[in-house]
Image (cartoon, rainbow, N blue to C red):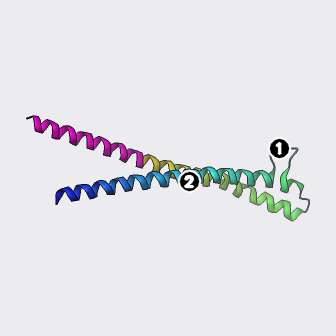
Amino acid sequence: MESIKLQNDSIFRCRLILALVATGCAILVAALLAGMFWGHMFAVIYGTSVTDPGVAGRETAPEMVEGYAALKPLLNLTLYVVPTTLGFTGAGLFLTGAGLAAADALADRWQAWRQKRRATE
């Protein structure tokens, strides 16, 4: 009965590690894509240089200029906060999974060493 429990624990640990690593990788990809999307969105609306003023720079109506000016800090915040949060979350999940995998491998080696040592005594 104990060997079945150990086998089930091992399967659970492997699945947990795989889920953490896969989710971490997926969220890291989402962070990269979000960073690219929001960077391009900001460049289209506000331009990348003086020669390319973007959509907001070509606007002449005072109400629209005021609206773009009010939107700029919010969009700028989103440009940095969303990808950074996703990046740290993905990295944390990935590193947690990798750390658990390393700890699991070390525990297996330690158990094998203990059993070998007990067999020689």
Please tell me which residue is depicted at 89% across the width and 62% down the height of the picture.
Answer: 62
Give the magenta part as a residue range.
Answer: 97-121
Instruction: Please state, as top left, top right, bottom left or bottom right, where the N terminus lies in the image.
Output: bottom left
- Most distant residue in the right direction: 60
Looking at marks 2 and 1 on the same chain, the residue that comes earlier in the sequence is marked by 1
Compute the Cα span from label 2 to label 1.
28 Å
Q: Seen in the image, is 33 located left or right of residue 60?
A: left
Residue 19 tag number:
none
Please tell me which residue is depicted at 26% across the width and 43% down the height of the picture.
Answer: 108
Q: Check the image and report above or below for 22 versus 62.
A: above
- Most distant residue in the bottom direction: 63
> Magenta region's main secondary structure?
helix
Q: Amino acid at mark 2?
A: Leu
Classify residue 12 by image quadrant: bottom left
Q: Position of residue 68 (x, y in %)?
A: 80, 59
* Few, some or many residues within 10 Å of mark 2 (<14, 14–19, 20+): many
Q: Seen in the image, is 89 located left or right of residue 7?
A: right
Q: Check the image and report above or below for 97 versus 112.
A: below
Please tell me which residue is depicted at 66% across the width and 56% down the height of the picture.
Answer: 78
Q: Seen in the image, is 89 located left or right of residue 107?
A: right
Q: Amino acid at mark 1?
A: Ser
Residue 93 on the magenta span: no
Residue under label 1: 49
Q: Position of residue 81 (x, y in %)?
A: 61, 53
Residue under label 2: 86
Q: Secondary structure at mark 1?
A: loop
Q: Secondary structure at mark 2?
A: helix
- Most distant residue in the left direction: 121
Q: Position of residue 2 (x, y in %)?
A: 17, 57
Residue 100 on the magenta span: yes
